[in-house]
Amino acid sequence: MPVYRDDAVVLRTHKLGEADRIVTLLTRHHGKVRAVARGVRRTASKFGARLEPFMVADVQFYEGRTLDTITQAVTIGSYGAEITADYASYTAASAMVETADKLTEEEPSLQQYLLLVGALRSLARGEHGPNATLDSYLLRALSMAGWAPSFHDCAVTGEPGPHSAFVVQLGGVVAESVAPPGTPRLDTSTLELLTALLTGDWTTADAADGPVRSRASGIVAAYTQWHLERGLRSLEHVERGPGKPQKKVQPS
């Protein structure tokens, strides 16, 4: 049976037997792969730590009938330790990998792979606040999957904006003529922040104040939960505080 290798980010793991794990990975060229990593729970395992969630590795697989087997793993991006050391980053990363797991299948999805790796790298480096990094990732991942939200023109009629009525079920802001009764309105600052998170305008995103970030996060969470069939369990644990991004202090 053939052997193949690919760059992959670890999404989740499950125990198998006394010493093995089933690892779910999002690969660069082979889509989502579930494979067995034998003996990785033993202390003498050579690559057990390289197959923990949030790690990025060059992985060699042996193709099997039902599950492939991981025969080698070389670290490319070691993000696990930095992410798990900070609770807000850990919960944000957990929501990211759960989203990637739900949005991807066996078909290759290079854009989703690159987006997830970039978001995890940013979290590990503390480049922006964990909430903002997560919200930006969610909006972009959903857009790549075909659910791009509209924060300016009407999502129903295409009527040029700006519009303030926001309807999750209709795909974003809508014109007054099609807004259902009681539709909530979003202020200009919140819409500007949502647009910045979607487009990667970090100058605008990092400058937003606490209340605006909180409102934007609520919109992103609602939009995500609506479009993912069973929602995200990990999103319930995400800290939604308004804290500004902080540089991580390295231990002496």
Image (cartoon, rainbow, N blue to C red):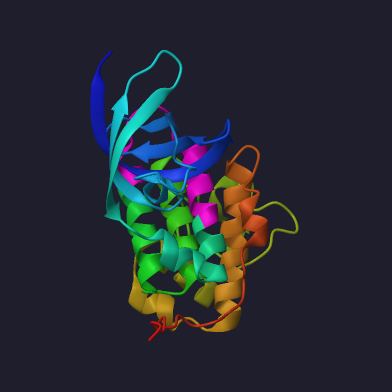
Q: Residue at x 39, y 59 (%)?
A: 120
Q: Nearer the viewer, residue 200 or 112?
A: 112
Relative image position of residue 157 (x, y in whole percent): 50, 46
Q: Vertically, is 60 above or below 154?
A: above
Where are the magenta residues, as a range?
94-113
Q: Nearer the viewer, residue 187 or 101?
A: 101
Q: Is residue 242 left or right of residue 130?
A: right
Residue 156 seen by the camera: no
- The image quarter in which residue 14 lies: top right
Q: Residue at x 25, y 17 (%)?
A: 2
Q: Vertically, is 154 above or below 209?
A: above
- The image quarter in which residue 181 lies: bottom right
Residue 96 belongs to the span the image colors magenta: yes
Relative image position of residue 84 (x, y in whole percent): 50, 64
Which secondary structure is most common in the magenta stretch? helix
Relative image position of residue 158 (x, y in whole percent): 45, 49
Q: Residue at x 25, y 22 (%)?
A: 3
Relative image position of residue 44 (x, y in whole percent): 41, 46
Q: Quadrant of the C terminus?
A: bottom left
Residue 17 seen by the camera: yes
Q: Spot the residue most to the front.
A: 44
Q: Is residue 10 left or right of residue 99?
A: left
